[in-house]
Image (cartoon, rainbow, N blue to C red):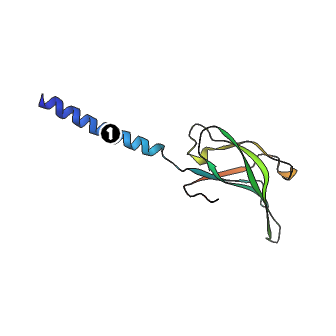
Amino acid sequence: MKLLILSLLTSGAISAAVGGAGLGARDGPQWCNCRIKFNSQQSIYSWDIPTSPGETQINANYVFTEVNGKGHQYNNACRVTYDRGQNPKNCASWTQTHGPDGPNCPKSIFVKGHITCTGSDHHTG
């Protein structure tokens, strides 16, 4: 009987330890910050996108850098839709599904670009 109790306590402790590790592995950032680069001079940026499941359409800032290095930023000029996939807290797995588009967004970037999303637990807004 003592052996059975010891065995159950041990297996419970192991399950709790493994379960805790599993839960920790699912934890992740509250927000993602994304950049979509189209060429060396044009990008759009979106900050503080919640890491909840599903697709989301978000406003993005358009940034254009002149050849001389002078940058111009146009806030909320574009819209873009991200698919946050099966694991939305893994920002690097997000994809661009629609956009960028919008009346103030340059038509020259109405294509898919090179997307980079990183996690953040600090709200920038």
Q: Is 16 displayed left or right of 62 in the figure?
A: left
Judge by depth and name the residue closer to the eye, 25 or 49. Answer: 49
Question: Where's the C terminus, which quadrant?
Answer: bottom right
Return the x and y of residue 10 as percentages of the image width and height: 23, 37
Q: Residue furthest left?
A: 2
Residue lying at 77% horizontally and 48% vertically, measured from the top left: 79
Callout 1: helix, strand or loop? helix
Q: Amino acid at mark 1?
A: Ala
Neighbour tally class for label 1: few under 14, some 14-19, many 20 plus, Cα within 10 Å: few
Q: Is 65 displayed left or right of 114 in the figure?
A: right
Return the x and y of residue 118 as percentages of the image width and height: 60, 53
The residue at which mark 1 appears reads as 16
Return the x and y of residue 22 as percentages of the image width and height: 41, 41
Q: Is residue 6 above or below residue 91?
A: above
Return the x and y of residue 37 as percentages of the image width and height: 74, 55
Question: Where's the N terminus, which quadrant?
Answer: top left
Total marks shown come to 1
Residue lying at 37% horizontally and 42% vertically, measured from the top left: 20
Q: Is residue 2 above or below residue 93?
A: above
Q: Is residue 33 above or below residue 56?
A: below
Residue lying at 14% horizontally and 31% vertically, measured from the top left: 3
